[in-house]
Amino acid sequence: MKKVFLALGITALLFTSCELSETPKATATEDDIFGTESGLKTYSYSFYNNITSGSDAFKGDAMADYGAVNSLNNFLMDGSYSAETSSGWSWSALRNINHFITKLEGSDLGQDVKNNYLGIARFFRAWFYYDKVVRFGDVPWVETPLSVDDKEVLYGKRDSRVLVMDKIMADLDFAYANIASGSSDGTLITKWTAMGLKSRIALFEGTYRKYHNELNLGSSANQYLQLAAAAAEEVMSKGPHSLNTAQGVELSQRQLFISEKPVTNEVMLAVAFSSELAILNDANWWWTSATYGPRYSLVRPFINIILNEDGTPYTDRPGFMAEEFFEETQNRDTRLSQLIRTPGYTRAGVATPPNFASHTYTGYQAIKYTMDDPSYDNGGTNTNSVPLMRFAEILLNFAEAKAELGTLSVADWTRSIGALRERSGITGGTKVLPTKVDTYLQKTFFPSVTNPILLEIRRERQVELALEGFRFNDLKRWKRGELMAQLPWTGIYVPALDKLMDLDHDGKPDVVFYDGSKSGPSITVPAGVAKVAIGGKASNFQTMTSTNHLEWFKAQPRTWYSDGRQYLYPIPANSLVLNPDLGQNPGW
């Protein structure tokens, strides 16, 4: 980051990929690295490459309940995922971090310098272990660089998530206390990033323990929820970050995702790209292509929960299910038009409705990460930075933790959920606690939640953080994995087949849907109008519901096993061969 994500080649000190028992290889001597602050700084850049692949940061929700795609992930297909195909049990990044910590602790450098870089290393160790716990549950806690002689650890059992989570919290507390504040261009961690990560992890663990009774850890759930609320409060009250409002209600949120330089008043950590260094991402290509990406399309049940601009539920509108695309997008929370192509959206000055010809299946085509210039669409040429943590998430973590604890006040709501809604142009309910349950939101997403405050906070999280990589983990911690299989992948309302539809009401038809059992539409179709077959042999995955809504992939069932095994991934079979004492996760 500080050009680490930009220029991987500058890290001449980067170690080759290694496992727990391997010795790292470096092209510089340890005196060069650990004897100077510049050496530590350069080494520490290697840690950033482990938290995400820069070119994949905008694909975090590639597998989500609200994303219709052209090919199901094997994880959601009955019998297609197993211990033999599992992955993620890699420890080379941890070996790199622990080697750094051990050598630095013995360095002769000043204690303040050492503590700063120890804080950075422990931040990344915490993030590494958080990912492992989320994926596998219990994992071995290792805080030294192992050698081949450390057989007790190498061939030992997994440690409990209780121990590992306690260690993660300790690492983040050390990071917050010792990382030098300094200035940041948004690509390097700061002490505030450490506290933000603590709020993220503690919220995950607190809610996971609360809703997953099988762990028998419910008695400690509130401890983590309190940690989450306190960490978020620390960032909100003492940190330098705030919501970006500079571009007004219609663009301030999306600007965070299409700016070349991170918008650092809100963005706390980002992956940056540069045309000068020829380090680019392929967001436009992935989000607009007919063949390169998964033709990712958001679905109607998710779009339905985005509020009206007056703060009332969209689904309270009379006849909302029969509203055509233009009507359903009017007078809504502006995050709808910052998330998908809506009427009025232009590219290179040209009105650009959802592209049924080569991308969207449902009509809800995402624009959150895509540059508006179409010249970026045909390859990896994007230069926009991609946020990994931003202040909006901290507000959401704060509100949810306090709501779960039953301590959220009107003032808390106003400074968190209310502030987010005001930023997006919502005029009602931003300074009062909700008292009425939205039955559509409850029935569709969270039937067991009866608290209107908690329901609204979950709505807000879904909308504000859409496509940012949180969704699957949120469903796991809320124990709502069933949505991955059950949420209908439905789309826009189509009043009739063989009818030209002008999606954006610009006077030009955009698409016609026709009976797929026939050779084509029964009407004359002007040039440039997309022709979409519904059902029939020509398009057995594009169908229509009984209420005349598009539906995608109904012919391919998604699977969420009733035994809940998918809340964790299986330990890879080859790792169990090497160490049977690891044990396998339930159901796998």
Image (cartoon, grey):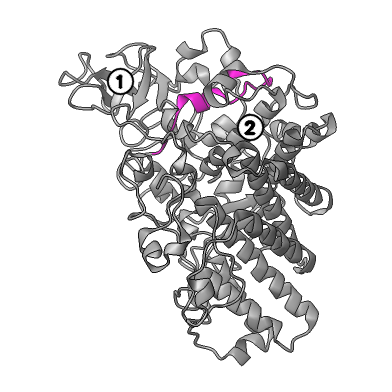
Q: Which residue is at 21% across, 21% downward?
A: 516
Q: Give above or below for 36 relative to 192.
A: below
Q: Which residue is at 50% across, 52% downward?
A: 135
Number of numbered callouts drawn: 2
Name which residue type carries label 2.
Answer: Arg
Left or right of 377, for residue 212: right
Q: Quadrant of residue 495?
A: top left
- What stretch of residues is rendered in magenta? 296-314
Identify residue for label 2: 458
Which corner quadrant holds the N terminus?
bottom right
Q: Residues within 10 Å of mark 1 (few under 14, many from 20)?
A: many
Residue 480: x and y, percent? 53, 33
Name which residue type carries label 1.
Answer: Val
Nearest-to-viewer mark from 1 and 2: 2
Residue 446: x and y, percent? 58, 26
Q: Give above or below for 184 relative to 517.
A: below
The answer to whether residue 64 is magenta is: no
Q: CA distance from mark 1 to mark 2?
A: 36 Å
Residue 349 in view of the camera: no
Left or right of 20, for residue 212: right
Marking on residue 465: none
Residue 417 in view of the camera: yes
Left or right of 566, for residue 461: right
Q: Earlier in the sequence, mark 1 or mark 2?
A: 2
What is the secondary structure assignment of the residue under circle 2? helix
What is the secondary structure assignment of the residue under circle 1? strand
Q: Nearer the viewer, residue 441 or 137?
A: 137
Identify residue for label 1: 512
Residue 89: x and y, percent? 45, 61
Q: Give above or below for 148 relative to 453.
A: below
